[in-house]
Amino acid sequence: MHLKLDHSAGPLRVLQITDTHLGATPDKRLAGASTLQCLSDVLGAAAAGEPADLLLLTGDLADDGSPQAYRMLERVLSGWDVPQAWLPGNHDDLANMQAVVPHRLIQTVAAGNWGIILLNSQIAGEVGGALSEPELDRLRAFLASPDWSFCLVCVHHHPVAIGCRWLDEQRIANADELLRILDQAPKARALLWGHVHQVYDGRRGALRLLGAPSTCVQFAPHSERFKVDLLAPGWRGLVLHEDGRIETSVQRLSHGCPDIDYDCAGY
């Protein structure tokens, strides 16, 4: 599904929300924290900032893949009069997403000089990710299109090592092919992902590499095994300028999620 935004001039403001981990019921907790309450707090804080033109939700939106979780997310976001594009993550059930929120499964977005593509890195039943050949072909065609001058590419799983051994075992298995395609595409300005529950900001030549915090529990950087971080939930904002420049920053709640179990050994 393609979304064309009525945005002919000025910068495009994008808000990335990721790894919400909602459950079938409102009392779902991750490492002791209420995922619904954390998300509600994040959305409230984000709404107080600059108005967004687009919401990107980059996977693990449900923790259990239940239809109820996607309905709950729709209700929570019902107050946002902003176009949205959702990606599945490894915790999501794509069939349930297609049944409950088919209108949110946007594959490409066009807005002024910018094109945005959302690629599905989910391998059903697996924690780690990969991009199928049809998804890579879709990316090649997208990058070759004359309809936009600059491109933002979005996935769920991370394509590069971030320094967490346990998470790096889950990155996109064929990331080398993804990065080769992007290396040959001067239009590609940034590659954006979720999954890691922490901030990453790097470069590969002219390509910006960006990971985002979760709206709930954060994972500690540079950890050998699963470890909860002390940082508060957050979100990433991006400003896509008409000349191809990207400004981006991560914002966090002024408070953490109550009741987090910082000694939790997994989820």
Image (cartoon, rainbow, N blue to C red):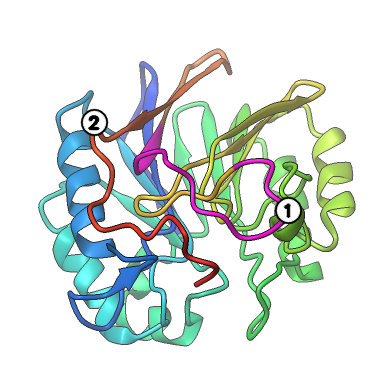
Pointer 2: residues within 10 angstroms few (<14), some, or many (20+)?
few
Q: In this rendering, is residue 123 above or below 149?
A: below
Mark toward the start of the polypeptide (1 vs 2)? 1
What is the span of residues highlighted in magenta in the rendered image? 221-236
From the viewer's perspective, is 53 left or right of 193?
left
Q: Which residue is mark 2?
A: 254
| Distance of label 1 from label 2 (alpha carbons) | 28 Å
Discs 1, 2 touching: Cβ within 8 Å: no
Q: Position of residue 200 (x, y in %)?
A: 61, 34
Q: Residue at x 33, y 57 (%)?
A: 260
Q: Position of residue 153 (x, y in %)?
A: 62, 43
**SS at mark 1 in the image:** loop
Q: Position of residue 82 (x, y in %)?
A: 23, 45
**SS at mark 2 in the image:** loop
Residue 76 is drawn in which quadrant? Answer: bottom left
Residue 157 is drawn in which quadrant? Answer: bottom right
Residue 67 is drawn in which quadrant? Answer: bottom left
Q: Which residue is mark 1?
A: 224
Q: In this rendering, is residue 144 above or below 98?
A: above
Observer-side mark, 1 or 2, equals: 1
In the rendered image, is residue 171 in sight? no
In the rendered image, is residue 106 in sight? yes
State the predominant SS element of the stretch in magenta. Answer: loop
Q: Residue at x 24, y 53 (%)?
A: 38
> Looking at numbered disc 1 in the image, what kind of residue is underneath it?
Glu
